């Protein structure tokens, strides 16, 4: 186990969502010391996210941003965490897409021969061959490889338990930070750096609130459906459904940019029920409805890197709707930037927001 007992730790991590937990694992892999401070009750996003990843943007049949790099990194990353924490987190799944027109099949075949070869199965599958029951599939369907989900709640629980000696549950008070060139003091402990992983609550952070996020509220349903058989696949059509455990399934998700609170709504419930009616044909019971706020950025790219003035303060945010896929690769990019002076990926570099910073 890492010696994390030095007087001055390398990092203070603020937050305990997907961003913070992933940064902690990558720091740990690189023998950097840290403490995590978080009040996990402040944000639901990572705790309720279905945790899915999908390499393909269906609307235009494009590869998701950096899909090859991100997926090749995330699978061994989460597998390694499963071993390290002795928990079950990762499910690799086939993602099924219905086809309604011949045009969609033609586009699929074309893309499968171009830059989506790794992700799109060909030839096209007849849904009968999948032996699924009570789900609404068209006669021919497309299957995406290398999709899946992580159990985000389990990932966070297992991580915080693994790092329990370096974790303190408390509200972080930004005004208690004492920053000098070589050290940062917080509650009488010294750190070389602080990395803020506060999700949409970065708006309350006086150092980084110059970054205006465009957060998106989202809601999901958990349902029970005894007769539904979709094996280990994800069925995607406007919304999505996949199996959580024996007879429980997750149905997602809604997007809303108004009323940014974490309360569930009847409007979202109705929207999810409508999505579900396009996905399955059997009876079901809703067991719970959950809401959270995605920390999406205005240009839909993550936001990572140093503060414009205080070079020992960092941000790791803006994971939006794709935290599971983005966090591992980008946390590694961040640590290589810190340790080896490698460049941050340009699209995610916080410096694109520096012009909005007023001292
Ligand atoms: C309905 C829904 C569905 C989603 N589905 C998916 C999906 O299928 N796949 C996917 O990849 N992503 C999905 N997401 C997005 C995903 O949840 C986010 O990308 C990710 O959780 C963001 O993680 P984060 O750590 O940046 O932020 P958060 O999860 O918001 O974490 C921020 C952390 O900081 C803590 N914090 C903030 N301020 C303070 C403070 N002052 N003191 C102490 N602690 C503080 C919070 O308590 C929290 O622990 C979904 C989100 C929603 C809402």
Image (tube, grey):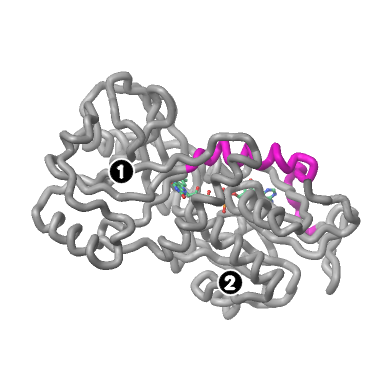
First reached walking from the N terminus: tag 2 or tag 1: 1
Provide residue 3's location: percent of width, then percent of height. Answer: 83, 51
Provide residue 345's location: percent of width, then percent of height. Answer: 54, 72
Q: Main secondary structure of the magenta part?
A: helix
At 21% from the left and 37% from the top, the residue drawn is: 278
At 49% from the left and 38% from the top, the residue drawn is: 263
Density class for disc 2 (Cα within 10 Å; few <14, some 14-19, many ≥20) is many
Provide residue 47's location: percent of width, then percent of height. Answer: 55, 40
Q: Secondary structure at mark 1?
A: strand
| Residue located farthest toward the bottom when viewing the structure as drawn | 355
Whether 342 is drawn above or below 151: the answer is: below
Residue pointed to by mark 1: 239
Whether 172 is drawn above or below 284: the answer is: below
Answer with the quarter of the image where residue 254 lies: top left
CA distance for labels 2 and 1: 32 Å
Residues shaded magenta: 150-175
Q: Secondary structure at mark 2?
A: helix
Answer with the quarter of the image where residue 357 lies: bottom right
Q: Is residue 80 left or right of residue 128?
A: right
At 25% from the left and 67% from the top, the residue drawn is: 114
Q: Which residue is more in the foreground, 282 or 97? A: 97
Residue pointed to by mark 2: 350
Count how many numbered circles sit on residues in the image: 2
Checking the image for residue 118, the label placed there is none
Asked if the residue at label 2 sits under 8 Å from ligand 1, the reply is no
**From where the camera sits, is residue 167 visible?**
yes
Density class for disc 1 (Cα within 10 Å; few <14, some 14-19, many ≥20) is some
Q: Is residue 166 left or right of residue 21?
A: right
Residue 188 in the magenta stretch? The answer is no
| Residue located farthest toward the left when viewing the structure as drawn | 102
Provide residue 179's location: percent of width, then percent of height. Answer: 82, 67
């Amino acid at each position: 186990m890492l010696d994390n007992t030095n007087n001055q730790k390398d990092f203070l991590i603020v937050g305990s969502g997907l961003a913070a937990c992933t940064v902690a694992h990558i720091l740990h892999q690189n023998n950097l010391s840290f403490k995590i401070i978080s009040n996990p009750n402040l944000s639901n996003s990572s705790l309720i996210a279905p945790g899915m990843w999908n390499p393909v943007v269906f609307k235009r049949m494009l590869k998701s941003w950096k899909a090859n790099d991100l997926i090749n990194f995330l699978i061994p990353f989460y597998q390694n965490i499963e071993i390290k924490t002795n928990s079950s987190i990762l499910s690799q799944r086939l993602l099924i897409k219905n086809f309604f027109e011949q045009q969609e099949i033609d586009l699929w075949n074309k893309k499968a021969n171009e830059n989506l070869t790794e992700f799109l199965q060909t030839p096209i599958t007849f849904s009968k061959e999948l032996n699924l029951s009570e789900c609404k599939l068209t006669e021919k369907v497309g299957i995406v490889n290398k999709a899946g989900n992580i159990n985000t709640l389990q990932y966070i629980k297992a991580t915080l338990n693994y790092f329990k000696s370096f974790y303190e549950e408390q509200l972080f008070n930004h005004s208690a930070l004492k920053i000098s060139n070589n050290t940062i003091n917080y509650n009488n402990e010294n750190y070389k750096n602080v990395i803020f992983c506060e999700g949409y609550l970065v708006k309350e952070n006086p150092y980084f609130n110059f970054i205006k996020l465009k957060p998106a509220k989202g809601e999901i349903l958990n349902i029970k459906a005894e007769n539904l058989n979709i094996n280990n696949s994800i069925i995607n059509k406007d919304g999505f459904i996949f199996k959580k455990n024996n007879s429980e399934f997750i149905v997602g998700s809604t997007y809303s940019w108004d009323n940014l609170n974490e309360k569930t709504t009847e409007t979202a419930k109705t929207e999810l029920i409508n999505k579900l009616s396009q996905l399955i044909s059997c009876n079901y019971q809703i067991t719970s409805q959950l809401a959270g706020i995605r920390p999406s950025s205005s240009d839909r790219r993550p936001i990572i890197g140093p503060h414009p003035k205080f070079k020992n303060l960092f941000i790791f945010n803006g994971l939006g709707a794709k935290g599971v896929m983005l966090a591992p690769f980008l946390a590694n990019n961040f640590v290589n930037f810190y340790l080896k002076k490698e460049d941050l990926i340009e699209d995610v570099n916080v410096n694109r927001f520096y012009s909005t910073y007023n001292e």
